Amino acid sequence: MTAPARNAAPWPYDLVIFDCDGVLVDSETISAGIWVELMGELGLTLSLRETLHELVGAALDDSMANMEERLRSPLPPLFEKEFYARMLAALAADVRPIAGVGDALSRIDVRVCAASNGTRKKMQLTLGTTGLISHFGSHLFSREDVDRPKPAPDLFLHAAASMKVAPKRCAVIEDSVTGVTAAVAAGMRVFGYAPGDTTGALAAAGAEPFASMGELPALLQTSGPAGGLDA
């Protein structure tokens, strides 16, 4: 006997593109803590809260340039290497999946991939440590694949092209204004993971916000792609 399909109704998307940090894995506070530690060693005191605001969704090059402006001097030549070494070690020890995301992925009945402003090595580590990589296989796209990271649309367009899916048949799951901006510019429908959000920043940037990963499969299935169901 053939097992029944998990969902009788057709899905309105052919691909769901997930950001990684803060959407799949709870890594942002860990990374920000390492940043605070390193900046403290350079004489710049930062709070974890302001550091999260600085780093979430941003490309590392931009964050480093901002810190050089605040320090009024260049960062040490090996700063980036040291940051990655400490961060990867901390992530390997402490990273956890976002609550409910594993179950949500199991209930999404279309292809998925991940697209991050982080490096592929970081994605492989965090998704591998949390066991989520089984949902994605080799379908991981990073800022290293394109000339312009988010908020440019290039990374999302590259992911869609690599997966052979038209942008309007893609849904994007993001947690930052940077990522939402990129998805909107790519012509994709975007859903903003915003637990406890009181500012509405993701909605203002063009996302449909949701507060729990448990909501996501039904939200995807009952929505429509950018441009309508016939796009």
Image: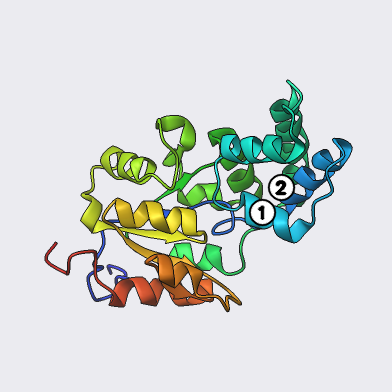
User: In the current view of this chain or complex, which residue is farthest to the left?
Assistant: 230
* Depth order, front residue of 145/15: 145
- State left or right for residue 23 relative to residue 40: left
Q: Which residue is mark 1?
A: 28
Q: Amino acid at mark 2?
A: Ser
Q: Nearer the viewer, residue 77 or 70?
A: 70
Quarter residue 164 falls in: top left
Q: Position of residue 15 (x, y in %)?
A: 31, 55
- 19 to 211, vertically: above or below: above
Instruction: Name above or below for residue 93 compared with residue 146.
Output: below
Nearest the camera: 208 or 171? 208
- Give the residue at x 26% y 55%: 187
Residue 107 in view, yes or no: no
Q: Give the residue at mark 2.
A: 31
Amino acid identity at mark 1: Glu
**Element marked by disc 1:** helix
Residue lying farthest to the top in this orientation: 77
